[in-house]
Amino acid sequence: MWLMDKKKTNEVTLNSMAGPLRGQRTGSEEVKVFQEAPRRGHPLDLSVWGLPQGFSAHVGNPHLVIFLDSFEGIDIEKLGSQLDRHPGFKEGQMWSLSL
């Protein structure tokens, strides 16, 4: 909003690591952001933690996506600290568990 107000426009485009992000004013306090679909990266072996394969994805910052059959028996806090130190993401990453 600030940049749009400063430039007296209703659209701006910002460059990100995932490609251009276009913002469009949709209301007095709302902006809709358009971005390209996430780029799927390489598979990661997570069997050491008893998990199936995960996949890296890039949406502007690194993500790790893990598809599960169930959340049952998963210690999220312990898993999070392990995933945060995964050697495949030397600068850290966001991660998601999905059913």
Image (cartoon, rainbow, N blue to C red):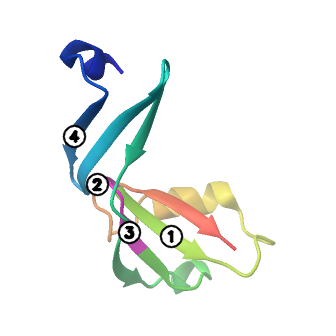
Q: Which mark is residue 91?
A: 2
Dot 1 or dot 4, earlier in sequence: 4
Which residue is label 4 attached to?
A: 14
Residue 45 x %, y %: 45, 85
Mark 3–mark 4 distance (CA, rounded to whole Å): 20 Å
Q: Which mark is residue 34?
A: none
Residue drawn at (19%, 18%), measured in percent from left and top? 7
Which residue is label 3 attached to?
A: 57
Apparent side of residue 87 relative to residue 77 in the rendered image (left or right)? left
Residue 98 x %, y %: 64, 69
Mark 2–mark 1 distance (CA, rounded to whole Å): 16 Å
The span shown in magenta is: 56-61
Label 2 environment density (alpha carbons within 10 Å; few <14, some 14–19, many ≥20) = few
Q: Considering only vertical position in the picture, is 1 above or below 88? A: above
Residue drawn at (55%, 74%), measured in percent from left and top? 66
Q: Which SS class for mark 4?
A: strand
Callouts 1 and 4 close, C-beta under 8 Å: no
Which residue is label 1 attached to?
A: 65
> Front-most of 7 and 57?
7
